[in-house]
Image: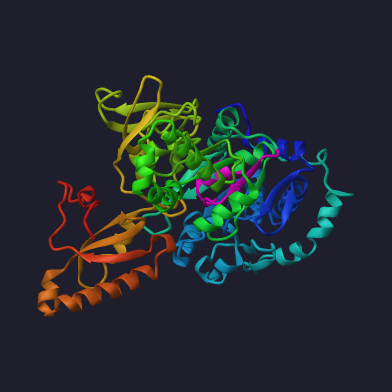
Amino acid sequence: MIQENFIKYIETSLKENWDIPALTDYKGDSYKYKDVARKIARIHIMFEECEVKKGDKIALIGKNSANWAMTYLAIISYGATVVPILPDFHSNDIHHIVNHSDSIVLFSGDPIWENLDEKSMPNLRAIFSLTDYRLLIEGKSENIKNIYEKLDTLYEELYQGGITPEKLSFDEVSNEEVGVLNYTSGTTGFSKGVVLPLNSLAANIRYARKNLPLDPGDNVVSFLPLAHTFGCAFEFLWPFSIGCHIHFLTRTPSPKIIIQAFQEVQPTIVISVPLILEKIYKKQILPLLDKTSMKLLLSMPIIDKAIYSKVRKKLTDVFGGNFKEVIIGGAALNKDVELFLKKIGFNFTIGYGMTECGPLISYANWDKAKIGSAGKLVDTLEIKIDSEDPYNAVGEIMVRGENVMYGYYKNVEATENSIDKEGWLHTGDLGIIDEDNYVYIKGRNKSMLLGPSGENIYPEEIEAKLNNLNYVQESVVIEQNNRLIALVYPDLDMVNADKISESKLIEIMEENKKVANSSLAKYMQIAKIKIYPEEFEKTPKRSIKRFLYASTEI
């Protein structure tokens, strides 16, 4: 357990940065640190009056916003456990997470609430709007409405004349307590609630404060999903802990909107997934470099350096022109893109982590980064490569230490499969290390794909839905050109028995795609179904060797 206390990080930042901007909704409202303190205090009073206990689970769902951030801080600083849910999850998945997590309160964005059914979440005592905090639903035998209506009076009684830094004081909460229950998936049978202690959050913040380049008052743009540990830790919790000004997009983060926000806000640091840089490289830079005249100029010494300098300046301006570095995480960066960015001297670095570590495992500043690596192991973890020669022979990456989760909620089997008796977390990733503890990822044991904004996509979930549909024997979901493609091996016995023609089978599969997509989150939507002519090759355990199909021509 580290000495630095997570709750104290938050309380101290509120007191020390009282009068400066804290949270802003892009093109919307703005809040100073004292406004955040006031909002947290009101929510705490509400919890106390409603007899919410320390350790109770409180679910939170909505797009990135100041209200989302303030609610998260209020829940966790009260001593309750926050259950952040991705806003793109299907309503059935949201119901399942709320129920499986044993949440007693739900804060929901209005557009999401419109598609939810409170009867499917019978254990909730109350549902509040994340848009304006109004009470949407109260459970039977509850008196929450009456408490809510006198909240202003209760606040004035406790903080006569208003809250001040001197009056602000959170109850002591040990880092041993569970802070976050983070679901890596929503689908029943696939959902695993990662149990993260406050110690994991504090360890991530401590490392970032010591090693990453941010100062009080710096601007940050938050566009990665806050319901994921990557965006939450490094676009919100760490910057908030040191007094930064965080700007939330509050809308679907298309590349156009993201770049527009970068240029207006001019953030000091940029946290990104590979997709953003890869799209810019492919659509804007590569066409320019592929011109015959440009190739000729790049073959000339001195001139090539001048051209690369202009390209670097253009790319830097895309991200606002004021950043110290771009940190890329969530998935591997295309090697050609990485080499090009290094060649032009672009300030970028690649980190590595996973939800189960809250999330950071390795990182290095851009000027210390090594080509092909995912950074250096953080100082709160140990690392072990499951091979006879960790410097040369690829093996599973295992870590142990302060960042690691307690396990998966109500899932002993999954926990024991992930964390061994010696405390080593088996990441499911394959790699090697060097003598300086830089991590080089060489492959994935697990099948997880990355969504457009850093969402975790587990193809088995999509395949499970497809395999229950008409004329589908088995399927494999792959990713190509940032689209999800389903390879389907048809049930040939049924096809032949029903005398289904090839053209009719294609029509059926198109209908299957629509049916499957209707129950999938937007970022998990299937773009195309391709009929595969033969049964998929299996391991001795009858698992599909999906790596064989990753590069299938479509």
Image point 60% across, 38% down: which residue?
Answer: 238
Quick one: quadrant of the C terminus? Answer: bottom left
Q: Quadrant of residue 294?
A: top left
Report if residue 517 lies within the magenta region.
Answer: no
Instruction: Residue at the far top: name it.
Output: 435
Find out whether residue 221 is within the magenta segment: yes
| Vertical position of residue 143 compared to residue 336: above or below | below
- The answer to which of 303 and 134 lies nearer the viewer is 303
239 vs 291, left or right, is right
Confirm whether residue 405 shows in the render: no
Q: The magenta stretch spans which residues?
A: 217-236
Q: Above or below — where is 498 with respect to 125? A: below
Q: Nearer the viewer, residue 337 or 192?
A: 337
Looking at the image, which residue is at 63% across and 32% down? 5
Question: In screen coordinates, is 389 left or right of 296?
Answer: left
Is 76 left or right of 402, judged from the image as shown? right
Can you give x and y, in whole percent of width and height, for residue 40 in the image?
A: 72, 49
Point 47% across, 26% down: residue: 368
Count of numbered tags: 0
**Quadrant housing residue 351:** top left
Camera-side residue of 265 and 127: 265
- Give percent across and percent down for residue 147: 75, 62
Query: Vertically, is 489 above or below 432?
Result: below
Question: Is 315 situated left or right of 526 in this image?
Answer: right
Look at the picture and state if 482 lies above or below 309.
below
Q: Position of residue 227 (x, y in %)?
A: 52, 51
Can residue 76 be seen here? The reply is: yes
Residue at 55% of width from left, 54% of height from top?
258
Name the quarter where the N terminus is drawn: top right
Instruction: Give x and y (percent) for residue 99.
Output: 49, 59
Q: Colour mode?
A: rainbow
